[in-house]
């Protein structure tokens, strides 16, 4: 177990996601990018979680939402997929020199989805290791939980413990053969709000959102989860996975989902949670503050 520490407040803003929202100047795009601003004893952390598919919508929306890229201290990549890492090359042209990029060490592996032909779905060339370094970014690669400030850390590599969250049909090349990709680089963010509990922020939840929630509780020793935000990748989930996942999510005060979550899953969560469920759209803001009492 690790001592996670606590923050006084956290604000999560959806900078880019598939759903632009209604009557908005913001641009939607397949993928995800969130801004996490956490405050602890008067000091602030500004952390970009994922970078969307391309940097144009991200930079456009940042301008409209009054987010200054040069004030971002860290970029955390939840996993390698192109819809989360494609904007990295472009956004690091605007972030400060020395911005740190936190990810799992297997983030650069060659991974594919195999349909009629093989489609590469990993980190695109425009966001390559060397491009990002040339832009002034430095990589912090770790399998272990990484602490940004007390109260904000990554889950580290997720232990798969549930029986109903299967590996996906995606592949990597190993010894000249295509084998199933265990997607070990799928890592999420944990924020511990003083006196309240944990907020989990996930990219695509390829490790299974229930596995992720269980890991967050196990490694921090904090039992309460107050918020779960991100993509839950339940588009092809069977009934067992769906109902067990909704049971787990229902324990949170707030769930905010979109991107790869899937319509059926969103409907099930919404039916169960009512107003405690929010759609993840461009510009959506979710905030949690410490219990004053
Ligand atoms: Fe993904
Ligand atoms: Fe995704």
Image (spheres, grey):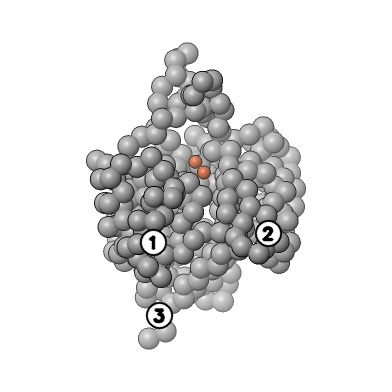
Q: How many numbered discs? A: 3
Q: Nearer the viewer, mark 2 or mark 3?
A: 2
**What residue appears at the point 58 percent right and 72 percent down from the top-left corner?**
43
Query: Does dot 1 land on a helix, a strand or a loop?
Result: helix
Circle 3 is placed at which residue position? 291
Determine whether label 1 and label 3 are within 8 Å by CB.
no
Determine whether label 2 and label 3 are within 8 Å by CB.
no
Q: Nearer the viewer, mark 1 or mark 3?
A: 1
Residue 228 to residue 114: above or below: below
Query: Does dot 3 land on a helix, a strand or a loop?
Result: loop
Query: What quarter of the picture does the C terminus occupy?
Result: bottom left
The crowding category of the residue bearing disc 1, from other C-alpha atoms within 10 Å (few below 14, some 14 to 19, many at least 20), is: many
Q: Position of residue 91 (x, y in %)?
A: 70, 49
Determine whether, in the image, residue 175 is placed left or right of residue 81.
left
Query: What quarter of the picture does the N terminus occupy?
Result: bottom left
Marked residue nearer the N-terminal end (2 or 1): 2
Circle 2 is placed at which residue position? 26
Circle 1 is placed at which residue position? 270
Marked residue nearer the N-terminal end (1 or 3): 1
Marked residue nearer the N-terminal end (2 or 3): 2
């Amino acid at each position: 177990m690790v001592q996670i520490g606590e923050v006084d407040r956290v604000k999560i803003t959806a900078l880019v996601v598939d759903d632009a929202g209604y009557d908005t100047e913001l641009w939607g795009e397949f993928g995800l990018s969130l801004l996490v601003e956490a405050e602890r004893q008067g000091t602030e952390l500004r952390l970009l979680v994922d970078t969307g598919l391309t940097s144009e919508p991200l930079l456009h929306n940042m301008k409209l939402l009054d987010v200054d890229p040069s004030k971002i201290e860290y970029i955390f990549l939840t996993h390698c997929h192109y819809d989360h890492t494609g904007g990295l090359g472009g956004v690091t042209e605007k972030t400060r020199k020395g911005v740190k990029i936190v990810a799992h060490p297997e983030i650069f592996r060659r991974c594919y989805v195999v349909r009629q032909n093989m489609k590469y779905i990993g980190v695109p060339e425009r966001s390559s290791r060397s491009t990002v370094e040339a832009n002034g970014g430095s990589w912090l690669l770790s399998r272990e939980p990484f602490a940004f400030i007390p109260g904000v850390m990554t889950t580290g590599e997720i232990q798969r413990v549930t029986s109903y969250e299967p590996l996906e049909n995606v592949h990597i090349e190993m010894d000249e053969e295509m084998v199933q990709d265990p997607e070990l680089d799928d890592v999420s963010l944990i924020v511990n709000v003083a006196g309240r509990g944990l907020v989990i922020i996930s990219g695509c939840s390829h490790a299974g959102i229930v596995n992720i929630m269980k890991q967050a509780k196990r490694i921090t020793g904090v039992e309460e989860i107050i918020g779960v935000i991100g993509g839950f990748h339940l588009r092809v989930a069977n009934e067992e996975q769906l109902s067990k996942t909704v049971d787990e999510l229902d324990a949170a005060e707030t769930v905010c989902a979109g991107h790869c979550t899937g319509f059926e899953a969103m409907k099930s969560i919404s039916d169960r949670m009512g107003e405690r469920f929010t759609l993840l759209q461009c510009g959506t803001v979710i905030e949690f503050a410490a219990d004053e009492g």
